[in-house]
Image (tube, coloured by chain):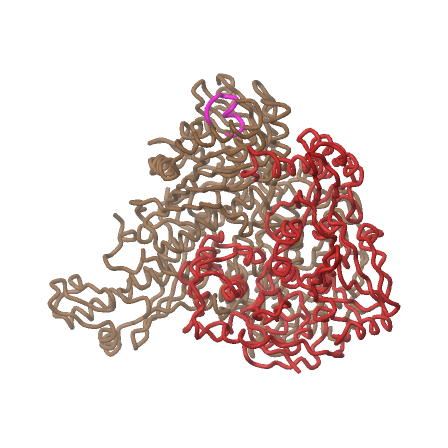
Chain colours: A red, B brown
Amino acid sequence: MGVTINGTTCPLDGVPVHRSLLDHVRDQGLTGAKEGCAEGECGACSVMVLRADPAGGTPRWTALNACLVPAVAFDGQEVVTAEGLGTPDALHPVQHEMAVRGGSQCGYCTPGFVCSMAAEYYRPGRPAGGFDEHALSGNLCRCTGYRPILDAARALGEVPADDALAARTARPAPAAPPADLTAADGRFVRPATLDDALRQLADEPDAVVVAGSTDWGVDVNLKGRRVPLLIAVDRLPELRGLLDGDDHLQVGAALTLSELERLLAGRVPLLDALWPQFASRLIRNGATLGGNLGTGSPIGDAPPVLLALEARVVLASTDGEREVPLEDFFTGYRTSVRRLGELICSVRIPLPPAGIVAFHKIAKRRYDDISSVAVAHALRVEDGTVVRARIGLGGVAATPVRARATEAALEGRPWSLGTARAAGQVLSQEGTPIDDQRASAAYRRAMLGTSLERLWHDHDARTDSAVTA
Amino acid sequence: MSALSQRPAGGVVGQPLPHESAALHVTGHALYTDDLVGRTKDVLHAHPVGSPHAHARVVSLDATPALAVPGVVRVLTADDVPGVNDAGVKHDEPLFPSEAMFVGHGVAWVLAETAEAARLGALAVEVTWEPLPSLVSIHDAIAAGSFQGGQPRLLRGDVEAALEGAAHVFSGETEMAGQEHFYLETHASLALVDEAGQVFVQCSTQHPTETQDIVAHVLGVPSHAVTVQCLRMGGGFGGKEMQPHGFAAVAALGATLTGRPVRLRLSRQLDMTMTGKRHGFHAQWRVGFDDDGRLLALDATLTSDGGWSLDLSEPVLARALCHVDNAYWIPHVRVNGRVAQTHKTSQTAFRGFGGPQGMLVVEDVLGRCAPLLGVDADELRRRNFYGPGQSTPYGQPVRHPERLQRVWGAVLTNADVARRRAEVDAFNAAHERTKRAIALTPVKFGISFNLTAFNQAGALVHVYKDGSVLVTHGGTEMGQGLHTKMLQVAATALGVPLSRVRLAPTRTDKVPNTSATAASSGADLNGGAVKDACEQVRDRLDTVAAGLLGTTAADVRVEGGVFRRLDGLQEVSWEEVIRVAYSQRVQLWAAGFHRTEGLHWDSTRMQGEPFKYFAYGAAAAEVQVDGLTGAYRLRRVDVVHDVGDSLSPLVDLGQVEGGFVQGAGWLTLEDLRWDEGDGPTRGRLTTQAASTYKLPSLSEMPEDFRVTLLEDAHEDGVVYGSKAVGEPPLMLAFCVREALRRACAAFGPAGTSIALASPATPEAVWWALEAARAAGRDAGHVTEGAAPAPDQPAPDAPALHPRTEADAREQTPVHP
């Protein structure tokens, strides 16, 4: 067993289950990937891993924060670092553009930028010269001001036919073999099936369940959390489907957000409003809806949106399956109705989705920030009247909540600026926002208060719609 | 034109080259201090035992439980220090303190076989604390009269009389936050001991000599027993000028006591918790204008938040006072400075070194007063620019004031400001919800260390028998491109292709007694030293070549590795001349030295000519503000900046762009928050991680970013006619803040004055525009007419570190 790094297989025997892929890569003498923050915020640790496409398409070189993921989870996987892309004498096209355009100054963030940029370079369907700058949303540079980095990205042409990493995508990505590894600090289990996973969880209900590990990795690195057993569910086939029900979509809890974004292809507009504001591309490449609900953070980005969508959560255990409306899921600060031994399997999103939607995330930075307050709107308007309003809120209480008083103040009223402002007064009084380092309670309330007016402007006012800041 | 600034034809300086390590950066092959750990055997890892209190006495410390943790080898405490238990140059920073002065203050360090074991060991150390009263906010410190160090005073003319006679007098307060450096590479040291007990410390430091000094005095050994090397840094920005020394000393002490290499690398959280930041400042001011909006007098008291120890707070304050004028002639000036002592990290150097804070005061004054004077803010600024023959409040003539007009005019033209301002006005008239604004601001920034003694540098240039060249100099590389420039200087001075020259890592046993790579001075000082060393070798080689070419040395020219006679009739290769020179027993290497001429400074009176020259720049920003959230976009930025004749245009462009974005981060986004409550986490930095402290990402760069370097900008008396570039561009970002102010004002009635918090986060912008909508003219929190004078120093207030200055003067020639 082992992980293949830049074509060389590196054993994982005895590697602690709390050791990150980043540290393991660096242990191999590959010191290009750096630890800049150890919590998936800076991207200096970015590496590429080959991932299968859940829709059966071409495998993808996918950039990940190596600081957040346990090395043992990469058993059988293929990883490429900046060292694997090119050498100083034979630069990869991405490296060449970065070097000649002044894309590196101190150089510390550079290998991570190179990996994120290379993943975008290899993205199937990327047009020559086309570059999605969100691919770099999880990489921080303190020196350059980004202009030369963006220029380098935009200068990238088509991938040459003889490119080795592109050629590798002609063959399937490696599967994730079942695993049961024990090291000095604990045990890592990757069950083969959902049944195996549920049995494991029934036997050891205190185990920590990880998928993308984007939250767990922070706990390990910053809070020093250690546990006896990790159960990886990220590759369980039962958790990775997207199914069309009669009146709903069923979204696998272990699909990554990047995969979901591609699979849904715009079918749920409110989710499309969510994706670019959910952390960074590096995080979305690992994070899952199941994980975002499972951690139960009151400032998670997905819960307000899923509340507005009236999503339901499917929980499974060895005793069977049950479905819980998301509004009944959270019970307190980071607690939920999920019982010991239960696993979040999927999320059901009712169809058809509402017509007037928005996700208002109030934060200091546009990319990759944590919200001080978040509002998700889903309104149905028929003949000028609001017939159904669903509003999910984050950052105003110990749990994500529905803005029920505001919904009531909207339903049955004409959809007008007057209604938006009047209901905004109600919205500003929802929840119990607090003062903290992200924002004052007063600002949070003010932002609740203006959110419906923003929604109205963006959907129905013709004067200002194209110029929202 | 001076010999130093004269640039030969065909030189390598001036070529737009990528960073000399670019190929290593992009492939992950460039090594940083902590990358060496995997190449070193038997390394021990260090972890601090940090204080949970903002202020507490260590009643007892029991390391025994830590030693029971598997892998823990030793716990370092004050008892282990053979030399001086101090990590600062002011002797106010005990390395192992008996009194913790801020949350996270390390009182002991655990050494272990793994980083994990060291962390667990630190948790196991049992400390009994006696919590003591603490001051966390600068306001509390001012109220309590808690100050440290000297209290400088900058005086010119008669402020009271000038204010008395001024047509318009305004007063107000200005407050600005500090800034975390957030160099991507956190502090790192790796210390080894050799067979003779000498210590070798690899360290991410901007000031290897001072790191060496501190390590030596902690260990109680002479400096010659300690060597410090810095391969390169993953960013410094001033944060590694003073702060690395203590960490290097802990690693060195551990290596000495255990005989094993010791690695000390801070996690991001520890780095943010333990190390100093840009000083936040508080300012009280009164200002007088005449009827035309010309500044008559400025009366201000600036208080910086120094944190728990002095560190570099005094020189930072001195630079703030020396930049409170920015680009403006103010006939009557009284500016007092003081450093508050609080129970926080010891604030330190950060790109601009107090200059940005001083300049922000006057920019804030102008931005808030312009609407009250009824003068457009850009015009108010231009009207007050320095003119010919005028001097700064500290008595330095302002040379090249016409460059202010040139950069300003160039920005107005390049940015098409007149047309775009009309568009902005039309936009704002048509849109109620969103407002746009354009603003221009200038920069005038003094170059040289205020302390004259620091303006010296050394270099060592070896030419080997095969003609290859190895250059070592005293400056450190932190991404600013210093090594790239030094390679260009060496190749130019020697007349060889760049490929013949290699640059060796910075080490204290190659070039001694170096100054910090700081104050933007790296290229000026080390460039002068490298050029001096190269020219010594060149002079000898010219003589050898003259013999081979049958002419005199004065008639020999070398370019591109070929020596030619002036008449061009004969040539001989560099390699051949080197071969012959060696056989003639000509010395092929030289030590170079440079000191900046013409500087003098009296820090007690705050008078003199501390700066070799001023760097100038101007910038225009256009922003758009959302009136429903306070969120904003930076639509376009135009910059014209004066770097003299650029040594390396691609490098300089990168410095200007990067400095601008970092400055915009300080002014608009980056938000340091300490817990000022009375709970158990009082004094804790609540934004001590990348998830809570946000620096600019790709989404904050200007959507349209146009930077040009001022042309025909030769600077006499500086290496190859260039100017320093590291710090000045940071302050170009004032235009973003001023544009936000104007956009907020557009939400109120005409003539609205706006007070805008710094950083101007979306929330701060929201409150500013809400005030504009609600209060109109009162939103600027500016008082008109007579107002009480700012706090004045007590009669017995100490002067600014007179001892250090006096010491320096005794040892350094002073040019009156």
For the residue pair B278 and B76, the one nearer the viewer reads as B278
Q: Quadrant of the C terminus of chain B?
A: top left
From the image, give the main secondary structure of the stretch colored magenta. Answer: helix
Find residue A332 and report its horizontal and vertical position in percent.
84, 51
Q: Nearer the viewer, residue B575 or B58?
A: B575
From the viewer's perspective, is residue A352 above or below residue B34? above
Residue B374 is one of the magenta-drawn residues: yes
**Extent of the magenta region:** B367-376
Residue lying at 49% horizontally and 31% vertically, measured from the top left: B427
Q: Answer with the quarter of the image where residue B36 lies.
A: bottom right
B279 relative to A102 in the view: left or right: right
- Is residue A385 a member of the stretch shown in magenta? no
Is A237 placed left or right of A63 in the picture?
A: right
Count the numbered circles shown: 0
* Place of residue B597 in the rendered image (x, y in percent of width and height, measured from the top left): 35, 48
Question: Relative to A222, is B203 on the left or the right?
Answer: left
What percent of the width, then of the height, locates residue A107?
49, 62
Is residue B773 among what the camera can see?
yes
From the viewer's perspective, is residue B77 above or below residue A308?
A: below
The residue at the far right in this view is A319
- One can see residue B223 in this view: no
In x, y percent, where is residue A13?
Answer: 69, 82
**Quarter occupied by residue B394:** top left
The image shows residue B141, relative to residue A177, as above or below, that is above
The answer to whether A180 appears left or right of B313 in the picture is right
- Quarter where residue B568 is shown: bottom left
